[in-house]
Amino acid sequence: MCYRVNTNFSIKQAEKYYDAKETDLDYQPEDEINGFSHPKTAVILDIAPTEILTAQWGLMPIWAKEDFLKKTNTLNAKIETAETLNSYKNSTKNRCLIPVKSFYEWQWQDAKGKNKRKFEIAIKDSTLFSLAGIYSLWENPETGKELYTYSIVTTKANELMSKIHNIKKRMPICLAQNNHKKWLEGNPLEDFSFPNLNPNLAAVEKSENLFAELFPL
DNA sequence: CCAGACGTTGTT
DNA sequence: GTCTGG
DNA sequence: CCAGACGTTGTT
DNA sequence: GTCTGG
């Protein structure tokens, strides 16, 4: 579901939005990043809410081997099960914010998803907003280097997202500024699941060749 | 009992 | 480290 | 945890 | 019914 996001914002913009300072940030703005390449992105951690630093998309539990992500998809964590699953259970209280401009989702036009329409989704009237993340500090057994790794928490789709993500009907937990603190403070996961939290989302279509889809050759 | 998994919903 | 499928 | 076995030593 | 292999 939430595998591609837009991080095309400046560090300055993020510092202002979060009232935080970049500390250990290895970051390049991108219109579209792919979770499956396990990119490093900007994050704000609960332990230091005034710092913006770098973490890897793809959570690695403390016990994970180096190739863990090759076999296990931890890009998203379902809010309903995160607290019981091995990979997430010790990280559900490690809360982080992942700043994004938007994320992308594809609407299937047929049962097999042969034809899809692409949409870009964001919180309405926002410049930036946050995806809700849980994180784990992972130590590379080879080098001893520590790395923050995270997963984006997903929930049942709201009305708009059900129309777009029309097969799986899931969406990432989207936090406007007024919910940042609540998330970082470690309030119960359930407080943030739909419909307990229903972000005011808006979508625009980004399909590459709308004309061809409407009038196939 | 122990080997093997540990996850979500794409291939854009 | 801990769970689970066989 | 549960499906499947649960037995001995011939071909006389 | 109880054990055991997977």
Image (spheres, coloured by chain):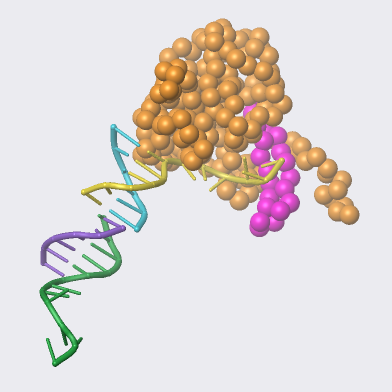
Chain colours: A orange, B yellow, C cyan, D green, E purple
Within the image, what quadrant is residue D9 found in?
A: bottom left
| Residue located 37% across and 33% down the image | A89
Q: Which residues are magenta?
A: A101-127
Q: Is residue A113 magenta?
A: yes
| Residue located 62% across and 14% down the image | A14
Image-based side of A97 in relation to A80, left or right? right
Nearer-the-camera pick, A140 or A202: A140
Rendering coords of residue D7 (x, y %):
12, 72
Within the image, what quadrant is residue A43 found in?
A: top right
User: Is residue A95 in sight in this rendering?
Assistant: no
Nearer-the-camera pick, A168 or A68: A68
Rendering coords of residue A101 (x, y %):
66, 24
Quadrant of the drawing holding the N terminus of chain A: top right
Image-based side of B3 in relation to A16, left or right? left
User: Is residue A215 in sight in this rendering?
Assistant: yes
Q: Is residue A126 magenta?
A: yes
User: Is A49 rendered above or below residue A36?
Assistant: above
Rendering coords of residue A120 (x, y %):
70, 34
